[in-house]
Amino acid sequence: MNHQEVHAICKKHMYRYVSVTLTSGAVYDGIVEDVDDENLYLAVPIGEMDQEQMRAFFPYPGFGYPYGYPGYGFPGYGYGFPRRRFVRQILPLAGLLALSLLPYY
C-alpha cells in the first residue's frame, strides 16, 4: 500500500478501537485519536499491571489526598474506584503493516 491508502484507512477508522501491527512486529491496540501526514495517534489503554506500577506516582487512594482518605459513596458513584486510563501512543504511518477493527466491550 502507498502512503495515501494507509492514511485513508486510518482516517476511516477514526475514534474506533483497532489493532495495529507494525513492520517491526510490534502490536498495539487502542482508539484512533488522530492521523496526520506522518503519524497515527492511538489512545492505548493501560492494563492492570501498569496501573499498579503507576501507584508509585499516586500512592494515596481516591484522588491522591495526602492524608489517606479512602474512597466513599455508593458503589459506582463514589471516589476511589479504578477508572480506565489511556496513554497516547504515536506510531509512524510508514511502519504500519496492518490495521484491524476490534470489538469494544
Image (cartoon, grey):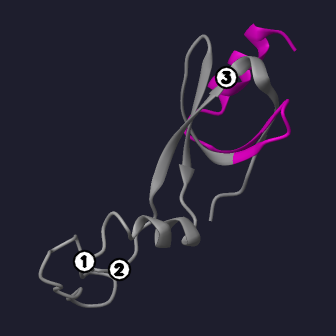
Place of residue 47 in the rendered image (x, y in percent of width and height, measured from the top left): 58, 65
44, above or below 36, in the image: below
Place of residue 56 in the rendered image (x, y in percent of width and height, measured from the top left): 38, 68
- Tell me, yes or no, whether the two marked residues, 3 and 2, touch with CB atoms within 8 Å: no
The Cα–Cα distance between marks 1 and 2, rounded to whole angstroms, is 7 Å
Packing grade of label 1 (10 A; few <14, some 14-19, many >=20) is some
User: Which comes sooner in the sequence, label 1 or label 2?
Assistant: 1
Which three-letter amino acid code belongs to the residue tagged 3? Pro
Between 15 and 44, which is closer to the camera in this rendering? 44
Residue 67: which quarter of the image? bottom left
| Magenta range | 1-28
Question: What residue sits right under mark 1 in the picture?
Answer: 62
Q: Which mark is residue 47?
A: none
Q: Check if residue 54 falls in the magenta segment.
A: no
User: Which comes sooner in the sequence, label 3 or label 2?
Assistant: 2
Question: What residue sits right under mark 3 in the picture?
Answer: 92
Question: What residue sits right under mark 2 in the picture?
Answer: 81
* Direction from residue 68 to residue 43 in the image, left or right: right
Residue located 57% across and 71% down the image:
49
The Cα–Cα distance between marks 3 and 1, rounded to whole angstroms, is 36 Å
Which type of secondary structure does the marked residue at label 3 adopt? Answer: strand
Residue 41: which quarter of the image? top right
